[in-house]
Amino acid sequence: MRPFHLAFAVHELAAAREFYVGVLGCGEGRSSDTWIDFDLYGYQITVHLSGKPAVDVVTSDVDGKPVPIPHFGVVLAMTDWKALAARLEAAGTKFGIAPYVRFEGQVGEQATMFFRDPSGNALEFKGFADDAGLFAH
């Protein structure tokens, strides 16, 4: 599978760098005075400096919880998901939806968590014990 690329706006590059490198553990790639490339688990994300705040268009009820739309993230192996959840908790991350197991005991069971970057962009990270559950019916 080829790497995915996503570009999005942030308020401040220094805060984005601190969060994506310091908290999420991303590698940093090329940058300028107005943007930074990050390596997010092998995927290229690019933050662009913008004076406009992130805005949720809507939330969607999933498993009884209000999921922010839009959002993005990565599907991780369960061990990596648990390690990230522990790192985020240790960093004092404020969760929109705290780490928990969604659809427990059902097809597609997954661990999930939602939080925001310093500019308000919503992120979701999922963990699967078995990746076959990702697209299971």
Image: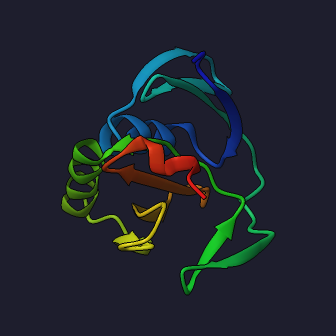
Q: Is residue 104 above or below residue 21?
A: below
Q: Is residue 8 left or right of residue 75?
A: right
> From where the camera sits, is residue 58 visible?
yes
> Would you identify the image quadrant in which residue 55 lies?
bottom right
Q: Is residue 52 left or right of residue 74?
A: right
The residue closer to the viewer here, 20 or 79, is 79
Residue at (55, 37) in percent of width and height: 13
Residue at (49, 15) in percent of width and height: 29
Q: Is residue 71 above or below residue 92?
A: above
Q: Position of residue 95 (x, y in %)?
A: 41, 71
Q: Is residue 98 left or right of residue 48?
A: left
The residue closer to the viewer here, 72 or 28, is 72
Q: Quadrant of the C terminus?
A: bottom right
Q: Position of residue 103 (x, y in %)?
A: 45, 73
> Would you identify the image quadrant in which residue 8 lies?
top right
Report the colour scheme: rainbow
The residue closer to the viewer here, 62 or 84, is 62
Q: Is residue 12 above or below residue 29?
A: below
Residue at (34, 72) in percent of width and height: 100
Q: Position of residue 26 (x, y in %)?
A: 39, 30
Residue at (60, 61) in percent of width and height: 120
Q: Quadrant of the N terminus?
A: top right
Q: Position of residue 87 (x, y in %)?
A: 22, 52
> From where the camera sits, is residue 117 visible?
no
